[in-house]
């Protein structure tokens, strides 16, 4: 009934009547996302009628009402089939100021029309394959970049930038060719990075360092939304960017990483918006070549160094222990470097662990990022090692029991999701410089067995990557407890009485044969398969492992 009345007025009415009836329809169906199939034909005809009205010279307010209804109707994929034509797409491009002939954005009264046109294009391109093909034909990505350049430094048109960026994200998500076009032909990487700089109002103090005002106001909702859309679009543009071949690209990625560092150190209007902002920043950092992530940390400024020195000078000269405590309590500083961004990433990771759900989507990106940073950058690894795996003192509890970051990560090492437990174990392994003995000290053999089996390190040793040879220092408490630590569980256990001490030799032999027979029965019934270690440290059936050792011994004998 609503569609019939609106269609009748659209076909026969004048601009004022059309505006009123479409405004009523929009108010009534603003939250409608599922439509009755019985009125499908009427909605198609209403769409066609609206496009015909948009061709006429009508007031701006009437254009906005037409576009609002068109945006609502474009949520229905079936309605879009007959109305998605090149002519209709060009109408929306013209209203969105995406034609090359439109040189400026001076008329503020036209901004609502531009925004609504971009919203309609977002829905239509996302829901219609025909519209996606027409977008390529009409070179929509280039037109969107041109519109961004017109408004990148103008904060009062954030809504236009936001939906322009959202449409770029949709296009680059649906078409891999557009990603390449954005990256190279349209210079999308520097353009989108500049959009982020504008949203964050960044002031550079050095080539890759920005001024951070910790007491400044949070980002506005509009700036936050604009930044999030830019981050998502940049993610698509850089999704295959792990390898950098040109110095100019390396510089651009470092600039982007510096902008993302700034992003991590600011907050949005709400806690949820801040988390969404940081989540998208983490995803984008995962695309940055690891060699360019060194800009996430930077040397302390003169002011920060002076402040730290003043704090220490205030303590008496004989208070050495207190001075060490002051230095260690400053968790943002390590080895003269500002670690604020890494500390934010660590806190972000812990929050994602505490959520207890969606680990694969929410946790693995930040864990993977911290792992690669630790593997490539020594200062980051040593800082994270201090935060996550501090020197052991109390070993009375199992490694997975407790509320520290270490306890939480060790629990993840036995998670049911293979991807989650692999990346959690890999992160701890890298913090331990890929040394098996160091990892086992913090996790216990039982928790680490999966990683060690996958890496062929069950017999001990270390990984393939090279790390500095600085030695770990054990606390006196750990050294005293070490002889009584259970290597499997990784915690201190009271000495247990040996059950065979009071047995006679005949009883011991009987129990041993009983165990052999049970294992033999389980093996013959294929309920249990005896396994052994090959010379390379990987697991294989016991017979095969013994055969390999026999071959090695024979070869060794022949050589002798």
Image (spheres, rainbow, N blue to C red):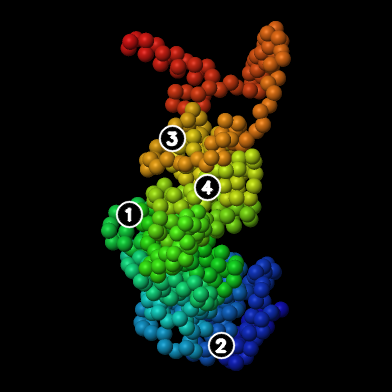
Q: Quadrant of the N terminus?
A: bottom right
| N-terminal-most mark, 1 or 3 | 1
Q: Which mark is residue 390?
A: 4
Q: Which mark is residue 244?
A: 1
Mark 4 nearby-residue class (10 Å; few <14, some 14–19, many ≥20) = few
Q: Nearer the viewer, mark 1 or mark 3?
A: 3
Nearest to the observer: residue 239 or residue 316: 316
In the picture, residue 481 is in which quadrant? top right
In the picture, residue 508 is in which quadrant? top right
- In percent of width and height, residue 390 lies at 52, 47
- Compared with residue 349, is residue 450 higher up or lower down, i.e. above or below? above
Task: Give the Cα distance between marks 1 and 3.
Answer: 29 Å
Mark 1 nearby-residue class (10 Å; few <14, some 14–19, many ≥20) = some
- In percent of width and height, residue 301 lies at 38, 67
| N-terminal-most mark, 2 or 3 | 2
Q: Who's the residue at 39% across and 74% down the image?
A: 203
Q: Which mark is residue 462?
A: 3
Give the residue at mark 2. 62
Secondary structure beneath dot 3 equals loop
Secondary structure beneath dot 1 equals loop
Q: Nearer the viewer, mark 2 or mark 3?
A: 3
Task: Give the Cα distance between marks 4 and 3.
Answer: 21 Å
Secondary structure beneath dot 4 equals loop
Q: Quadrant of the C terminus?
A: top left
Q: Are marks 2 and 1 in contact (CB under 8 Å)?
A: no
Task: Give the Cα distance between marks 4 and 2.
Answer: 65 Å
Q: Who's the residue at 55% across and 80% down the image?
A: 67
């Amino acid at each position: 009934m609503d569609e019939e009345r609106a269609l009748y007025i659209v076909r026969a009415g004048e601009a004022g009547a059309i505006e009123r009836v479409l405004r009523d329809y929009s108010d009534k169906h603003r939250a409608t996302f599922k439509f009755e199939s019985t009125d499908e034909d009427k909605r198609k005809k209403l769409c066609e009628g609206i496009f015909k009205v948009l061709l006429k010279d009508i007031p701006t307010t009437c254009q906005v009402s037409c576009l609002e209804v068109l945006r609502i109707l474009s949520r229905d994929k079936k309605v879009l089939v007959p109305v998605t034509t090149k002519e209709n797409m060009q109408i929306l491009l013209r209203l969105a100021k995406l034609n090359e002939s439109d040189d400026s954005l001076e008329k503020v009264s036209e901004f609502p029309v531009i925004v609504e046109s971009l919203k309609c294009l977002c829905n239509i391109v996302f829901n219609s394959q025909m519209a996606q093909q027409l977008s390529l034909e009409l070179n929509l990505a280039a037109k969107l970049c041109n519109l961004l350049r017109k408004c990148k430094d103008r904060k009062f048109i954030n809504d236009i930038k936001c939906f322009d960026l959202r449409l770029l994200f949709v296009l680059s998500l649906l078409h891999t060719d557009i990603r390449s076009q954005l990256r190279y032909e349209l210079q999308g990487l520097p353009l989108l990075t500049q959009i982020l700089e504008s949203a964050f109002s960044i002031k550079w103090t050095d080539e890759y360092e920005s001024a951070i005002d910790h007491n400044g106001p949070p980002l506005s909702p509009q700036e936050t939304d604009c930044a999030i859309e830019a981050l998502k679009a940049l993610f698509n543009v850089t999704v295959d960017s792990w390898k950098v071949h040109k110095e100019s690209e390396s510089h651009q990625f470092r600039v982007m990483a510096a902008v993302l560092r700034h992003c991590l150190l600011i907050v949005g209007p709400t806690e949820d918006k801040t988390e969404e902002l940081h989540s998208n920043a983490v995803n984008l950092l995962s695309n940055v070549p690891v060699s360019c992530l060194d800009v996430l940390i930077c040397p302390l400024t003169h002011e920060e160094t002076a402040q730290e020195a003043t704090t220490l000078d205030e303590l008496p000269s004989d208070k050495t222990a207190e001075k060490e405590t002051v230095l260690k309590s400053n968790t943002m500083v390590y080895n003269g470097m500002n670690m604020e961004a890494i500390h934010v990433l660590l806190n972000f990771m812990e929050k994602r662990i505490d959520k207890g759900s969606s680990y694969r989507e929410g946790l693995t990106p930040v864990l993977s990022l911290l792992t690669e940073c630790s593997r490539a950058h020594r200062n980051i690894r040593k800082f994270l090692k201090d935060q996550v795996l501090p020197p052991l003192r109390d070993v009375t509890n199992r490694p997975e029991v407790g509320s520290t970051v270490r306890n939480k990560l060790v629990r993840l090492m036995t998670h049911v999701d293979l991807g989650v437990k692999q990346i959690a174990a890999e992160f701890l392994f890298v913090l331990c410089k890929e040394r098996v003995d160091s990892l086992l000290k913090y996790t216990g053999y039982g928790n680490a067995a999966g990683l060690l089996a996958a890496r062929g390190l069950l017999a001990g040793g270390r990984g393939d990557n090279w790390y500095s040879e600085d030695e770990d220092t054990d606390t006196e408490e750990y050294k005293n407890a070490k002889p009584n630590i259970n290597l499997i569980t990784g915690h201190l256990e009271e000495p247990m009485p040996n059950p065979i001490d009071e047995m006679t030799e005949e009883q011991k032999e009987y129990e041993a044969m009983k165990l052999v027979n049970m294992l033999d029965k389980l093996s013959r019934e294929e309920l249990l398969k005896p396994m052994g270690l090959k010379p390379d440290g990987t697991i294989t059936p016991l017979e095969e492992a013994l055969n390999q050792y026999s071959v090695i011994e024979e070869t060794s004998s022949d050589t002798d």
